[in-house]
Image: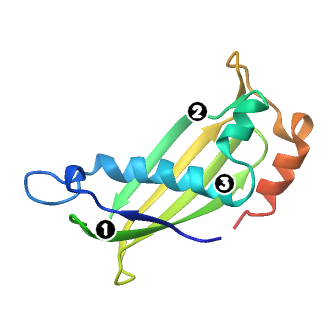
Amino acid sequence: MTPYIHHVQYYETDKMGITHHSNYIRWMEEARIDFLNQINWPMTKLEEMGLISPVINVNCDYKKTTTFSDTVSIMVSVTEFKGVKLHLAYVMKNENDELVCKGTSSHAFLDMEGRPIKMKKDYPEFFDAINQLIH
């Protein structure tokens, strides 16, 4: 997997010139979408199949600040997937390979009416593709 690269924008910083903490969660979503694209299961394909994937939990552990024009690489990995909830981990590093943030997110899989889906039974190809990536 290739890390997702984000360049910190001026509008993402606060009055002190430091990236506002809420942006790291946005970057996690950007990295998750990129991750799905890299494994050939883009969100558009999942939605066309009738799936939605809401966030049910998110966590960020901030380690080092970032500022305007910094480059942040975000590595996404699957930590657990049993077919109902997908658990992802994120490692964010700056251009000096220093850890700036570690995060996690959990996602459910629902049909378009909001009912839970059993991925192993209903979408075995996607289930297998994700399970091959568990670290």
Q: Residues within 10 Å of mark 3 (few under 14, many from 20)?
A: some
Say if 45 sits above or below 41 in the image. above
Quadrant (top left/top right/bottom left/bottom right) for the N terminus: bottom right
Q: Residues within 10 Å of mark 1 (few under 14, many from 20)?
A: few
- In the image, taking residue 109 as reference, residue 33 lies left or right, namely left
- Name the residue rendered at 51%, 61% in the picture: 90
Say if 5 sits above or below 85 in the image. below
- Name the residue rendered at 21%, 64% in the picture: 68
**Residue 89 x %, y %:** 55, 59
Tell me the SS state at disc 2: loop
**Residue 47 x %, y %:** 70, 32
Q: Amino acid at mark 1?
A: Lys
Q: Disc 2 or disc 1, which is closer to the eye?
A: 2
Which mark sits nearer the N-terminus, 3 or 2?
Answer: 3
The residue tagged 1 is 63
The residue tagged 3 is 37
- In the image, taking residue 36 as reference, residue 62 lies left or right, namely left
Which mark sits nearer the N-terminus, 1 or 3?
Answer: 3
Say if 19 sits above or below 45 in the image. below
Q: Residue furthest bottom?
A: 96
Which mark sits nearer the N-terminus, 2 or 1?
Answer: 2
Q: Amino acid at mark 3?
A: Asn
Q: Disc 3 or disc 2, which is closer to the eye?
A: 3
> Residues under labels 1 and 3: Cα distance?
28 Å
**Residue 27 x %, y %:** 42, 53
Tell me the SS state at disc 3: helix
